[in-house]
Amino acid sequence: MSKRTLLKDLDKDGEAVIVAWLVRKQGDTVLLRDSSGYREFRIRGVKKILELPVESLVLIRGRIEDGVLVAEETIPITLPYEERKYDYTSITPDTDPVIAARYSPWVLRSKLLQCVVKLQQHILEYTREFLYREGFTELLAPMASVVSDPGLRGARKLKTTLYGIEYELTSSVIMYKQSSAAVFEKIFYVARNIREEPPENISTGRHLVEFTQIDLEWALAGVDDVIGLAERMLKYISEKLAEEKRELYDELGVEPYVFKPPFPRLSYDEALELARRLGYSVEWGKELSHEAETAVAMEYDSPVWITSFPVVSRGFYYLPDIDRPEYNRDFNLILPRGYGEVIDGGEREYRYGELVKRIKAVGEPLEKYEWFLDLARKGGIPPSAGWGLGLERLTRFLAGLKHVGLATAFPKLPGIAGTP
């Protein structure tokens, strides 16, 4: 098998040793799949492969003549006990996400998901490339802690017991980011998070129960620093994808999108007023609904920043504006075309006394946050700013997918249990 030729490399006539799965057969034509993709061939010669069930893994020795596979020997490597019922070749960017979740091990074999996964791989590759050049250190994210982010906007944290102590599965690495920035100054995580989202959030197209964030923190930085960094990074990623991975966009059937900063900025109050003019009623101090957020973004032909959210609407870890203490120094980045929020961030509260007040104000027990508060009390938390970027949300946008459930392998969806 070490001498086999991948399907993508079978472009010329000549000898061929193929190891591939039989995806479909029709008449004397077969569709084959290996790790490099799909190829369809008309078969001549030994046609044993036409007698095999689909999803058989076969070794074929022969040659290619004018695009026809002349099989000299066909050896089954594995044979299914029964043929699959689900046709994963029909997956499109508009496929029902519940179907994609329930059949995710099969859906991963589709052309679409293979392209999406490769696109996501290169998003991560170029993200790391950019941040390393900017002097950031990458840390591995914890999977569980005695406390995680309480500001989950209606989602529920999942819990477990570790040696008799209740732990929370990671829903955010915010406190780890702040403490790590005290050591390395510029840090980031590629952090997996899990939250039990309200079931109705499946309809937004942008929520997963299990998801990935590029979580970044920069000590001694401010809002403008980290917004500028995010804009440069998105431009860098999208330009490299457009230049170097055009074939993935062609396979997905979409044009490459290149971010062109700087993006417009709206304050929360300005966004609220715009939403009201567009017919959406939003109470001051509340997050914009997904519908209102989409309507505001549709007024622009680019991503748009919404800044300065009310303190009462956000988590305890944002730093209030010294001149307008009822507002935070924070922001969201909203994607165009109705794709919604992709980045959430801001400057961080680092003062021990203020952290205590804010944690009490949201009704959380101080003892749960003791490790973090102990650092703050003893000078271990620096002033910093940072953000979290939703990897699957960015992938969905660039790939032109209807639902974020198609932007990841093995998706976990709001309200849907029992999926792989």
Image (spheres, rainbow, N blue to C red):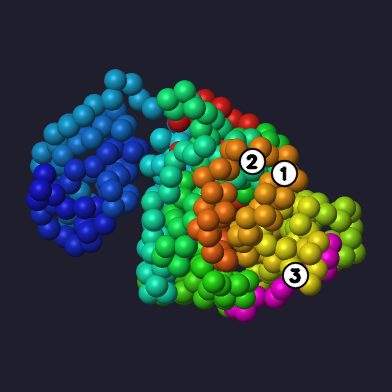
Q: Residue at x 27, y 46 (%)?
A: 34
Residue for badge 3: 322
Residue for badge 1: 360
Crowdedness of circle 3 by 10 Å Cα count: few (<14), some, many (20+)?
A: few
The amino acid sitting under disc 3 is: Ile
Picture layout, residue 51 above or below residue 202: above
Q: Secondary structure at mark 2?
A: helix
Q: Residue at x 56, y 72 (%)?
A: 221
Sequence order check, earlier mark of 1 and 3? 3
The answer to whether marks 3 and 2 mark residues whose Cβ atoms lie closer than 8 Å is: no
Q: Quadrant of the N terminus?
A: top left
Q: Quadrant of the C terminus?
A: top left
Q: Residue at x 58, y 43 (%)?
A: 369
Q: Image check: 15 left or right of 307?
A: left
Where residue 126 appears, as percent x and y from the top left, is: 40, 67
* Residue range corresponding to the magenta coloring: 261-272
Seen as rendered, the residue at the extreme top is 81
The answer to whether marks 1 and 2 mark residues whose Cβ atoms lie closer than 8 Å is: yes
User: Mark 3 or mark 2, which is nearer to you?
Assistant: 2
Asked whether the viewer can see residue 326, the reply is yes
The amino acid sitting under disc 1 is: Lys
